[in-house]
Structures are given as structure tokens and as C-alpha cells.
Image (cartoon, rainbow, N blue to C red):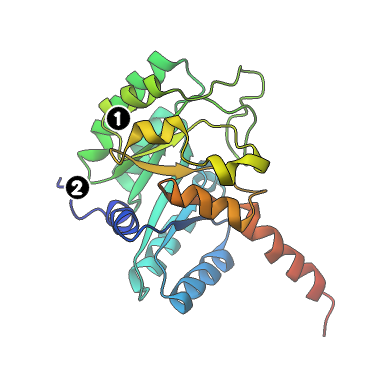
């Protein structure tokens, strides 16, 4: 199946040309989908709606609701499966669910096995018109519904890793970087990002504590997909709690 019409690829290609970042927001329920779509339409901004693999088990209809909302929206919206780590679940999602893109996260394996599995799943997804994100290196810790790597050694991305993952043919790459908050704004164009040199689109993870200035610096350095979770959902929940007792 041709990849030219893939919605996530097109959204990020436009972002690269326009030198801006696109919000890729995790959703947990219908209310989140509705709020993000309305906000995107009000701002006339593209959007990537993301689901964690746990949602496919806990709320299996949510991806269909997200896809329906994206189809009706008046701005470009794509649906992305984030941090998918189970080989068979990824194949099931590619075969049966309305995802435009999938993050094939094999970072809990050592590099060679990560690359091998990523290549195989890249081929599987591409043959079904689905674009693929991958992660180089490994950041210690975990997220909701995702394998915790806290018991594994963190592995930061180096320029050699970048070359190997670009050669693996992935569409988007999330490098394993440590962001030093006090210096990132001045040193965002790191050696790793420079090594990518526009050959693969960049994804930023772990943004929960990012300031607007830091995010803008990363976008200036070449990031087009900006993943957010608690950065935007924490204020949402604070607002709900503040108003929950109002008549």
C-alpha cells in the first residue's frame, strides 16, 4: 500500500516545511478526544491523537471514537499508537484498527534485537499504509501501561545509532536524550540532531516538565512531533477538581 497518503506522515511533512511542531497528545477517554479536537479546530492547528497500548485492552472502542472524530474534523488529525511494545499486538493493530501510525518501541531490547524487530514491524506496517516511529537508546523509567525500564540500564543515543535506525527505514525517530533544562535552550542543536540532518523526522518524548521556551528550542532544532501527556492533562484534571463541587 502506498505511503504517500499517510496522514501522520503528511502532517509532519507540512510541519517540517513550515518549521513548527505538532502536538501529539495522549487521550484516555472521549472527553479528552473532544477537548483536543475542539482546541485544534479553534487554533486551526493539526493534531496527532495518541493512545497507549493499554487503551486497546481497557477501552477498546476508544480508537474508533478517535478515528471518527479525526475524520469529521476541519483540520488535519491523525491517530497514533504510542509505545507499542508487544509484537503480536502491533500486528493486530496494523491489521484491524484505524491507526495512521504506530510507535514500534523495542527499546527494552538490546540494540541489535531492537533494530531487527523494528525492521520487521516497519515492513509489516508499511505494507498496510501505516507509518512507523522508533526509539533509539533507552530512557530509564516507564509510563502508563508501558513496560517499565527502570531495572534496565539507560542507553543514550549516539550518532552511530542514528545512522542504523535511519537505515532501518523508519519514518520518525525518538532519540534517547537527557535534556538538561538549564542549558537545553542554548544547546538544542545537539550532535545527534545535527547527524540526522533532515533525513528522518524527530519526535520529542518526556515533555512533562518542559517550559514553552525549552519546547520551542527543540522545535527550532528540528523536532516536528511533540508528545504530551501530563503537561496538558494535569491542568485539565486540576480544573475538573476545582469545579467538581459547583452546583
Q: Position of residue 135 (x, y in %)?
A: 44, 31
| Residue 205 visible to an observer of this rendering | yes
Kind of element beneath mark 2: loop
In the shown orientation, is residue 185 left or right of residue 15? right
The residue depicted at 39 percent of the width and 55 percent of the height is 79
User: Disc 2 or 1, which lies upstream in sequence?
Assistant: 2
In the shown orientation, is residue 244 left or right of residue 141? right
Q: Position of residue 161 (x, y in %)?
A: 39, 22
> Is residue 6 depicted above or below 94 in this figure?
below
- Quadrant of the image containing the C terminus: bottom right
Checking the image for residue 3, the label placed there is: 2
Q: Position of residue 188 (x, y in %)?
A: 51, 42
Q: Position of residue 117 (x, y in %)?
A: 35, 22
Graded by Cα atoms within 10 Å as few (under 14), some (14 to 19) or many (20 or more), the crowding at tag 1 reads some
Write down the residue under mark 1: 166
Q: Residue furthest left?
A: 2
Measured Cα–Cα span from mark 2 to mark 1: 17 Å
- Quadrant of the image containing the N terminus: top left
Amino acid at each position: 500500500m502506498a505511503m504517500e497518503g499517510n496522514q501522520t506522515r503528511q502532517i509532519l511533512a507540512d510541519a517540517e516545511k513550515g518549521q513548527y511542531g505538532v502536538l501529539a497528545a495522549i487521550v484516555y477517554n472521549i472527553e479528552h478526544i473532544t477537548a483536543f479536537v475542539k482546541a485544534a479546530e479553534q487554533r486551526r492547528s493539526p493534531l496527532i491523537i495518541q493512545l497507549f497500548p493499554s487503551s486497546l485492552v481497557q477501552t477498546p472502542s476508544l480508537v474508533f471514537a478517535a478515528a471518527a472524530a479525526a475524520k469529521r474534523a476541519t483540520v488535519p488529525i491523525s491517530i497514533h499508537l504510542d509505545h507499542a511494545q508487544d509484537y503480536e499486538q502491533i500486528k493486530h493493530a496494523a491489521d484491524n484498527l484505524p491507526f495512521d501510525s504506530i510507535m514500534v518501541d523495542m527499546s527494552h531490547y538490546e540494540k541489535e534485537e531492537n533494530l531487527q524487530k523494528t525492521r520487521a514491524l516497519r515492513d509489516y506496517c508499511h505494507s498496510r499504509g501505516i507509518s512507523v516511529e522508533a526509539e533509539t537508546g533507552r530512557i530509564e523509567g516507564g509510563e502508563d501501561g508501558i513496560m517499565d525500564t527502570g531495572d534496565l540500564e539507560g542507553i543514550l543515543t549516539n550518532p552511530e545509532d542514528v545512522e542504523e535506525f535511519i537505515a532501518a527505514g523508519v519514518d520518525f525517530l525518538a532519540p534517547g536524550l537527557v535534556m538538561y533544562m538549564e542549558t537545553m535552550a542554548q544547546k538544542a542543536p545537539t550532535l545527534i540532531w545535527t547527524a540526522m540532518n533532515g533525513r528522518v523526522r524527530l519526535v520529542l518524548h518526556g515533555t512533562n516538565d518542559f517550559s514553552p521556551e525549552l519546547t520551542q528550542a527543540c522545535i527550532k532544532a528540528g523536532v516536528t512531533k511533540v508528545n504530551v501527556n501530563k503537561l496538558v492533562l494535569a491542568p485539565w484534571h486540576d480544573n475538573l477538581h476545582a469545579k467538581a463541587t459547583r452546583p
